[in-house]
Structures are given as C-alpha cells and as structure tokens.
Image (spheres, grey):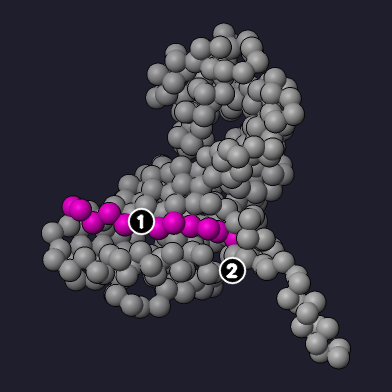
Amino acid sequence: MRRVLAILLFLALPAAAQELNCTVQINSDKVQQTNQQIFKTLEKSLAELINKTKWTNQTFRQKERIECTFFITVNAYASDQFSGTLQVQSSRPVYGSTYSTPVFNFNDKDINFRYVEFENLIYNPNSFDSNLVSLVAFYSYMILAMDADTFSPLGGTQYYETAQSIVALAQQGGFKGWSQADGNQNRFFLANDMLSGTFEPIRNAMYTYHLEGLDVMADNQKAGKEKIKAALQELGKLYSVRPNAFLTRVFFDAKADEIQTLFSGGPSTDISGLQELLTRISPMNASNWTAIKN
C-alpha cells in the first residue's frame, strides 16, 4: 500500500524540466553540398545537447525554461570541418503580460568546429573534448547567467564563472575566440568582463531594467518606465569610465529596438536628456534614439 501511495505521490508532483528550451537552426545555403542531411543531423544533435543537458542544480518547471535560439550559418564545410557564424538569442517573459523581452543577442562571427555525423555530443565540465560542445556549453551558461541577472542583483555570477572555466579549458584546443589574443570582443572577454567589478553597472542595470522596470509596468507603467530610465542612466556612469565598452554594445544589441518602443508610447516621460545620453553611449543605434517620439 505504501508503495502505491508513493507512486501516486510521485506522479502528482510537477514534472521537473531542463533549464533551456532551445531552437537550433542551421543555414547551409552558402555551402555547395549535395548531401544536406548532415546539417539536419547536426541541428537535431545540438538541440538534444542543449535541451537535455542538466546545466545547473536548480529545478525548473516546464513553463520556467528559458526560451532561446542558436542560429548557425555555415560558410564552409569540408570533410568533418565546419566554419561559420553563430547567432545566440534568449528572452524572458515580462510579469503580468504576454510579452517576452530580449535578454541576450550575440553574433559570434568566427566559429570553427569538427563534427562527424551521428557522433554523441556530451558536455563534460572537467575537460575539453570538442570545440562544438564547448561553444554550445559556453553560450548556454551565458544565457543562464544573463537571465539570472534580470531576477536578482548579480544573480548570474556562478554561471558566468562556469562560462569562464569553459573558456580556460577550451584554450587548449587552439580554436579562435577563446583567448584575449584573438581580439577584444570575443568569448574570453564576454565572460571575463561580466565578472569584472568595473562592469557591474551593466549587470545592475539588467536587474533594474527588468525586475524593477518591465515587471512592474503591468501595475504602474509610468513607475516602470522611470526605473528603466534609471537603468540606462547607470550605463551612462559606466560610459564615463569605459566609453565604447564591449558589454555596452552587447546590452544594446538586445535592447535598442525595445527601448525605442518603450519610450515612444505610454505615460509621458522626460526623454530630452535620455535621448542625448543614449546617442552618446550607443551611437551605433542613433536612428533608434532619434525615432523616439513620446
């Protein structure tokens, strides 16, 4: 009888899910390859790796899984060697609405990896086994970290630390993008800068923007917009110390269109100083800022 009750109790519990709900897309249009099946197999293998790996010790319900996309454009393929680009995007729901806000939108413009069709892709946190697996694991932890930063102050630290460990292990593989010698806007600096005290204003802004800003707009739209404005002003403080910082660009790559929309409608907010600030700290998105009409 106890066994039956235990089974019934187990079945009544909410099912635990992995952390990510990821869609993987591979574009091979640039490759003159008669057999396209390998790209479909790779797509399926990556989706299974990302969605079935338990990346953390946290319990996520099905509806709490983080929505994300990995979009690989293959520029060259020969034998088992691939090269191309990887666009990684993630979002999270906004409290009291049906809207999902973009959190991470990053284009890794130089990826290279080896893949043999049907090989098992398994993440081992203690070794470098495959540049492909390391790429996927690194960006999975970046997604987890940035999402956590939107829910609690500096909440993603442990995940950034894991991403940084992946960087250190991957350097032994000799692939580009893992070393500070490979440029100043790569995976090394993405993890390293997120853990630097210098760039805490960006992480604090992520929390203020989302939890104190977007998440209160369902109840008080004006108060939410004021908090979002305060978050952007925090980035202005960082600009005075580190103008044109890599992470500032990463932030606005995800948020520029949304900011334009937020401050072009709803309760009136003083945007004169805000437009000037945004133009100064993110000139690449100047067309968004001039288009703001309150």
Which residue corresponds to the image point at 43% horizontal and 44% vertical from the top-left? 106
Quadrant for residue 198, please give it: top right
* Nearer-the-camera pick, 232 or 95: 95
Indicate left or right for 191 with 288 as reference: right
**Mark before the other along the chain sequence, 2 or 1:** 1
Residue at 49% across / 71% down in the picture? 123
> Magenta span covers which residues?
19-30
Quarter of the rendering occupied by the N terminus: bottom right
Nearest to the observer: residue 142 or residue 176: 142
Q: Position of residue 30 (x, y in %)?
A: 18, 52
Circle 2 is placed at which residue position? Answer: 54
Left or right of 32: which side holds 41?
right
The residue carrying mark 1 is 25
Task: Give x and y (percent) for residue 38.
Answer: 26, 69
Is 27 a magenta residue? yes
Q: Amino acid at mark 2?
A: Lys
